[in-house]
Each structure stands twice: as C-alpha cells, then as structure tokens.
Image (cartoon, rainbow, N blue to C red):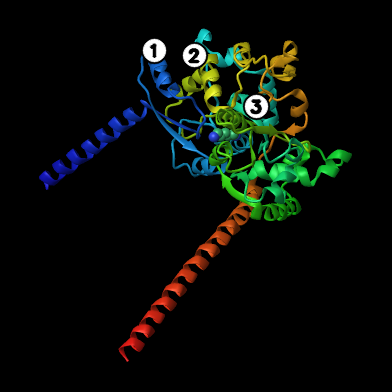
Amino acid sequence: MKKFFAVAATFAASLLLAFCVQAADRKEVLKVYNWSSYIAEGVIEEFEEWYFEQTGEKVSVNYMTFDVNEAMLSKIEKGHEDYDVVCPSDYIIERMLNNGLLLPLDFSAIPDSLNYIKKYRSPYIESVFREINPDIDANDYSVAYMWGTTGIIYNKAYVSAEEASTWDVIRNPKFAGKIFLKDAPRDVYAPVLIYLRQEELRSGKVSLQDLMRDSSEKSIQDVKDYLMECKPLVCGFEADLGKEQLTKDRAWVSLNWSGDAVWAIDEAAAVGVDLGYIVPEEGSTVWFDGWVIPKYAVNTKAATYFINFMSRPDIAIRNMEETGYTASNGAMEVLESQIDEECEPVDLSYFFGPEASAVRVNPNLYPDKAVIERCALEHDWGERTELLLDMWQSVKGSQASALTFIVLAVVVAALAIYFLSSRNKKNKRRKARK
Ligand code: N2P
C-alpha cells in the first residue's frame, strides 16, 4: 500500500511540474489572432527582438489568422482559445464590449518616450471609437489598426465608372459570372440596404446611422430577396481571393474593402490590367479594425507591448505599403510617406487637421471628406445577429446546392452513358456469338 502511495505521489508531483513548466512557457508566448494578409513580412520577428530589448524578456509570437469577423468572434465567445491580442472590426468590438469579453488596456508600464499610442493616436479615430458605445469608451479597450471604406473594385475595360457608381452593379446582367462578393455578411448587408432605401435616405425619412442599426425582419428579407437576384451572376463569396482574380482579369466587379482595392489596383497595373475603386453614390460604410485583449488572454504584458509596437510610425508605414490598407496612425510622418504629386488633392482635414485640407495622396487610401460624409459606422445587432447569419447561410448555401445539383447531374449522366454503352457492347458480343 505504501508503495502505491509513493508511486501516486510521484505521478501527481510530475504532473504538477509539467503543468508549471507549461504555464511558465505560455507566459513566453504571445498568441496573436489577426486578419489574413494584414501585416508586413518580418514585423513579427522584429517585435520579438524589440520586446526583448525593452523588457529583457523573451517572447515568441504564435501568429494565427482568420477571414471572417463572425468566425473569429464565435471562437472568442466560446472561450476555447486564450488569444492574447485580436483584431476585430468596430461592430464586433462593440459586441465584445457589451458582453464583457475585453480587458481594459493599460499602457502605464511603457515609458512615455516609447508610448506610440499616446503620441500618435488619431483624434478623428478617437472620436469615432467613442461612437461605438455611449456608456463605455472603446478607446480604453481598443487601439485602431487599419481603417477604410467598402466599395466596388471594377475592371475599366468592361465596366464604366458610371456603372460602378451604384451598388446595383452587383445585379447587372452584363457582368454575369464576373462578380465577387465578400464573405462578410454585415459588409454586404449594409450596402444592399442602403441601395434599397436610397429614396428614404434622400428624402431624409431615414439616416445612414438608422440603417446601420436596422435589423428588422422586413429589411433582412428585402436584402435577401435582392441577393437572391444577384446570386446567379455571382462567381463567388470570397475572403481574400477576389482581389487576386480581378488582377488576373478573371473577374470584373468586386464588392470589397478599400485596402484590397489599393493592393489590387497596384498589382493589376503591373500586368497591364486597369482597375478602379468607387464608393457608390448611394452611400456606404466606413470601418475600423482595432487591437483588443480578450478576457481569456494570458500574456497581457506582451500583448500591450505588441499593440504599442504596431502603432510605431515606421511599422505602420510598412504594414500599409505591403497590405494596401490604411493605418489608423495619426502621425504626420505616416501621411507624408504617402504623398504622391500625381494625385489630385484630397481633403483630409477631418483626419489630420486643417493643414491637411488639400493633400496629394491616393484617394482610395485616404478618402476625401465628401466620401466620408456619405459613409457610416456599422453597429452590433446583439442577439438579432443570428437572423442575419441565417439569411447569409441560405443565400450562400443555395449557391452550393445549385452547384451540387450540377455536379450530381453530370455524375448521373456519365453513369447512364457508361451503363448504356456497356450494355450495347454486351449485346453486340452476344449477337456476334450467335
Ligand atoms: C484583410 C482583411 C481586412 C479586413 N485581408 C477589413 N475589415
């Protein structure tokens, strides 16, 4: 019996030791969960070195990516993953705040000279973040990373600027089979609803802000009916593939984000394909993705340093140039790095202050004040989000069943041909034997 207790005690002690070693190791790991294609090469490795220089502590980044806001959120809500830093969009930050899923950010341990957030947080973005939740200041829980608009990328060889200036371009039969939609239910729902309610918007019966909170059954049904009309023309619901297909001249229209547009226009130009980007006249959404620390985080210290590092102007510029997306950084150095004398002046006073009222930058990267004035921020729908996700699944799913039907039909036809031809051969052989 004594021997049994000794063996059991040794086993328990080694389990405890293994657990402690693992826990200590986990403190040296930083789990980052970010959008795919959303960071420049080498930045992660540079952060690891910088963190060691600043703190004398080692950290190894475990970098994971997602493509759909809702898929990422569902992982956080289930609490199965202890991510340390995540990069959701505005309405998801709102939901996380409402549901107590975020830890407040505390940069007080970082010396002022290294505190890039304090130095470069854009006042414009700070004020937009205050709109996220009237009771809790989202700036205390999140630091914006990239931002932009939602619009239409189009191939100028087949689609005119006029045709691309309305959301209805995604229902234009001229472009059948050449249209991509983002696999982003809220970012497709909002433009379609704006399109459908354009009369009410013009007459002032509703505002863009109202529409961003409109989760009524009627609106969801109207959007669904509209999308079902578009669907036979759509070649796919994509996360990151659409921009590439446009550069290769395989698709002509894509409901997409401004950052993908900047990237695609640049890549396409290099191979002689002429793409453009337009935020349709009816209005659109302006979005912000921000770093947050979920409540299940383990390495909050490294997480805080990581968020700060991503706000360093040279890092922001590198991320911007490689991904095509616009850094939320308010440093003049970031704006100056984007000046292009070939561009028409853009009014960026809303972002960089009055001295930036006519800056020569790419308007797809930094939208003119007039464009921003016809855009609004999306808001969380709480429990009603399920209705949207169901609608989205049935729109996408029926595409899958159409495809499944075609595949099945081809298989049945092939089997029938095989069966008939082998029966004919058998008959011929039988006749020959007779
Ligand atoms: C980049 C995804 C950007 C997300 N692949 C825009 N909200």
Point 64% across, 42% down: residue: 252
Front of the two marks 2 and 1 = 1
Mark 2 lies on residue: 110
First reached walking from the N terminus: tag 1 or tag 3: 1
- Tell me whether the residue at label 3 lies in contact with that at label 2, contact meaning CB atoms closer than 8 angstroms: no
Query: Marks 3 and 2, Cα distance to the nearest angstrom?
Result: 21 Å
Q: CA distance from mark 1 to mark 3?
A: 32 Å
Residue positioned most to the top: 113
Name the residue beneath numbered marker 1.
53
Quarter of the figure with residue 32:
top left
Tell me where residue 161 sits by quadrant: top right
Q: Secondary structure at mark 3?
A: loop
Spot occupied by residue 317 in the image (x, y as percentages of width and height): 55, 18
Q: Is residue 120 above or below residue 40?
A: above
Q: Residue at x 71, y 47 (%)?
A: 215
Element type where label 2 sits in the image: loop
Horizontal relation, residue 212 to residue 410: left or right: right
Residue 323 location (% of width, % of height): 54, 27
Mark with earlier residue (2, 1)? 1
| Type of the residue with mark 3 | Asp
- The outermost residue toward the bottom is 434
Q: Secondary structure at mark 1?
A: helix
> Which quarter of the frame holds ligand 1?
top right
| Nearer to me, 327 or 413 | 413
The residue that disc 3 covers is 137
Residues at discs 2 and 1 in contact (Cβ within 8 Å):
no
Can residue 372 be spotted in the picture? yes
Q: Is residue 304 left or right of residue 335?
A: left
Instruction: Give amino acid for label 2.
Output: Ile
